[in-house]
Image (tube, rainbow, N blue to C red):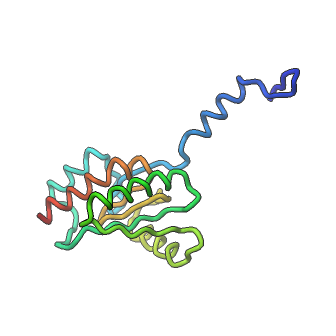
Amino acid sequence: MKKTERGLYSPIFLVPLVILMLIPACMGAIFQKDGTEITRDEVSELFSHDTILHENSPIQIQFFYGSGCGSCKDALLFLQSYGRKNPSVLIEYRNLVYNEENRQLFTEYKNRFNYSKISYPALFIGDIGITGSSDIIHGTDKVIKGYQNING
């Protein structure tokens, strides 16, 4: 890197570095239990074709996150708000930091869902998994409404 006369790094070199730091480290995805990745738009179509397994029971979410993860915090805040607005949806919050039982359960889910890109934040609703805060925030309600339409 090039230093200026004052010993500071040139803004030309720092701006790209700052931009890279703003990009989230975790890429998001929505995927089925067999590992097939689907888009947010395909969620509704998936339920209309009734191609996934479902039960006539309350909708449950398993949410896995790390307490020091910024992307996780965004997803956590969204789910807490969503849970308050939708009390019929049961959300299990599973912090992976300092909790071996939650890490083991997360590993079980990763093995059950044949999808190699599962990282946290991640949630699982029935036969659908979602990773990444953006996809969790924008895809969770679509999945839940799909299950509610099937079960309703």
Is residue 82 shown left or right of residue 131? left
Residue 132, compared with residue 67, is above or below; it is: above
Residue sitting at 42 percent across and 70 percent down?
109
Q: Position of residue 52 (x, y in %)?
A: 22, 63
Q: Position of residue 125 (x, y in %)?
A: 31, 64
**Which image quadrant for residue 69?**
bottom right
Residue 107, compared with residue 9, is above or below; it is: below
Foreground residue, 96 or 129? 96
Residue sitting at 38 percent across and 49 percent down?
135
The quadrant of the image that shows the N terminus is top right
Foreground residue, 77 or 108? 77
Is residue 119 shown left or right of residue 68? left
Residue sitting at 34 percent across and 66 percent down?
61
Q: Residue furthest top?
A: 5
**Which image quadrant for residue 112?**
bottom left
Residue sitting at 32 percent across and 50 percent down?
139
Is residue 144 shown left or right of residue 37? left
Total labels drawn: 0
Q: Residue furthest left?
A: 152
The quadrant of the image that shows the C terminus is bottom left
Q: Position of residue 45 (x, y in %)?
A: 19, 50
Residue 80, compared with residue 112, is above or below; it is: above
Q: Residue furthest bottom?
A: 101
Q: Position of residue 106 (x, y in %)?
A: 47, 70
Is residue 46 shown left or right of residue 74? left
